[in-house]
Amino acid sequence: MSTLHVISAGAARGLVSALADRFEAAHRAAIDGTFGAVGAMRETLLGGAPCDVVVLTQPMLVALGAEDHVVASTIRPIGEVATGIAVRAGDAAVDVHDDDALCEALSRATSIHFPDPAKATAGIHFANVLRTLELHDPLASRVRTYPNGAAAMTALAQAKDARPIGCTQLSEILYTRGVTLVAALPRRFALVTRYDAAVASRASSASLAAAFVALMCGDATRSLRAAAGFVERSDANRVA
């Protein structure tokens, strides 16, 4: 059995995992995925790690295509993902419907979990949200940051303090056991990120890699993408 190496933004981890068995059965190829913050995954790709398929933000993949690290003609959209607020499973939901409510919820939290504020899409954005709300310094002792959104949500699920809260992309919240999605960030702070997939220029089997990109992005898996937090419109911040 062959192995397909996927280097992917953490936002797509749930989707890649959900497709792994189907792809293996159809192509007799196991999926070996490496997931993390987009900046870190770009560094992994450029560092020469084995790679057949790349999943990153759309601007990043376009740039990588221009530099011949991915095959530009194979870039296809997966969908858009909003960034949202989560609480530990079983905890009461918090009100984050507008700026004031979000500020109050964060101020009352006993710990705040989110991904890398230097390399992760959601982490960079949320750190700026805290600054805009003038909470970055006052709440610094409660902030907990992690290499990626999955690690942040796992830590939120395991938190022992009274009122932990977290922020990352919806796709990472939805596939992490032990956390509950509250809502997307309020409109002023909404962040919707488009993710694409492409065949890596150094793919060991371009045809196999293309088959996985087609499966991930095709009509047959549209409902699976939606369940994983990806939508096809720019209103991804509309979350009940």
Image: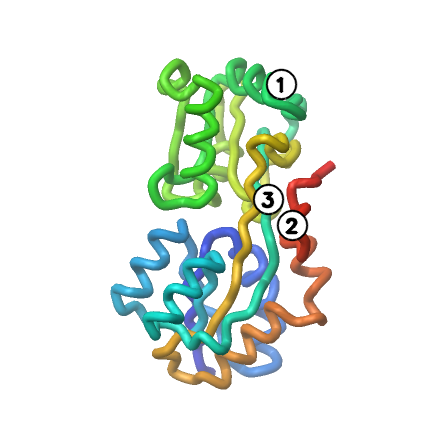
Question: Residue 9's image quarter?
Answer: bottom left
Q: At 56% across and 80% down in the image, what residue appears?
A: 211
Q: CA distance from mark 1 to mark 3?
A: 19 Å
Q: In the drawing, does residue 117 fall left or right of residue 16?
A: left
User: Which label's residue is closer to the chain start, 3 or 2?
Assistant: 3
Quarter of the figure with the C terminus = top right
172 relative to 143, above or below: below
Disc 1: CA contacts within 10 A as few (<14), some (14-19) or many (>=20): some
Q: Position of residue 128 (x, y in %)?
A: 43, 31
Q: Nearer the viewer, residue 17 or 82?
A: 82
Residue plotted at (54% across, 43% down): 169
Q: What residue is pinned by disc 1?
A: 101
Q: Residue 189: where, in percent of width, then height? A: 55, 32
Residue at the spot 47% in from the left edge and 52% down from the top edge: 10
Residue type indicated by callout 1: Ala
Label of residue 24 in the image: none
Q: How is the image coloured?
A: rainbow
Q: What's the CA distance linking mark 3 and mark 2?
A: 9 Å
**Could you tell me which residue is drawn at 38 percent across and 33 percent down?**
145
For mark 3, give the secondary structure.
Answer: strand
Q: Secondary structure at mark 1?
A: helix
Q: Which residue is mark 2?
A: 234
Question: Which one is earlier in the sequence, the residue at label 1 or at label 2?
Answer: 1
| Residue linked to disc 3 | 82
